[in-house]
Amino acid sequence: MNVENGRPVALVTGASRGIGAAVCRRLAETGWDVAVAHEPVEAMQRMAEDLAADLTTQGATARAYSADLRDAAAVAELVASIARDFGRLDALVSNAAVDRITDWREISIDEWDLTMDVNVRAAWLLARASLDLLAAGSNSSIVLVSSTMARSGQPGRLHYSVSKSALLGMARTLSREVGPEGIRVNAVMPGAIRTESETERFGTDVDEAVIAQQSIRRRGVAADVAHAIRFLVSPEASFITGQVLAIDGGAH
């Protein structure tokens, strides 16, 4: 598949479900083609392929890609595959993340390294591998998906909060590195967003406590984040870079 139809192309990681899938859907609705990147496990592959097929029936060009983002060679091959299949790349949405709840005294070295490798190192590897493709475009951007835990912290999530804080520094610094090449870099900080992962962990038991902390008295959903990311990758945001946008209903 070699698509050179003038439609912008986005690579979204962690896109099988949740925020990543919502971003793919929102971009496809607004004229984008999407590379749906997913963790190389059967369940995530199946969901990513179903999403890509659904988006294709709706008129977008979408394709699922399996990649272990901890592996620099796998990241390079992912971007090379997108170059071959689509012929361009206009936006990178680095959304894939590991989020485990562990008492900070009990976090193993392996769990710490896994969190940093997927949440931080992969974002850097993706940006580096995508540089030439992004620089060739006229409205190219990177969006890093952080978390309001970078601001607030939470017991049991020391490694996750540290990794999401690192993405804020990456967004601000990388925006200065690649700005002269016409690439914008921003970050979003979702707050408590209802996703499949949250529901699997907590059910709806957290709803009342979450809403009580917010200025807007409803649960945030993945589409709320997707709308903001769609704006940040659009030409309407062409003079916005190095910024961090909280999407949390006013909780912080």
Image: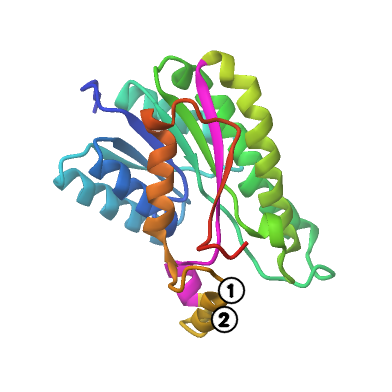
Viewer-side label of 2, 1 = 1
Residue at screen point 32% across, 21% down: 87
Distance from the alpha carbon under mark 2 to that under mark 1? 7 Å
Question: Which residue of the protein is positioned furthest toward the right in this rendering?
Answer: 105
Residue at screen point 38% across, 23% down: 83
Q: Residues within 10 Å of mark 2 (few under 14, many from 20)?
A: few
Relative placement, left or right, of 109 versus 101 is right
Q: Is 100 located above or below residue 27 in the figure?
A: below
Marks 2 and 1: CB-CB under 8 Å?
Answer: yes
- Residue under pointer 1: 213
Identify the mark at residue 179; answer none if there is no mark: none
Residue toward you, 190 or 119: 190
Q: Note whether residue 71 is visible.
A: no
Residue 85 x, y percent position in the rendering: 31, 27
Relative placement, left or right, of 251 versus 111 is left
- Residue under pointer 2: 209
Question: Which residue of the protein is positioned furthest toward the front in this rendering?
Answer: 215
Quarter of image, res 158: bottom right
Q: Is residue 190 magenta?
A: yes
Q: Residues within 10 Å of mark 1 (few under 14, many from 20)?
A: some
The stretch of residues the image draws in magenta is: 182-200
Residue 219 x, y percent position in the rendering: 44, 71
Disc 1 is placed on an element classified as: loop
Residue toward you, 142 or 133: 142
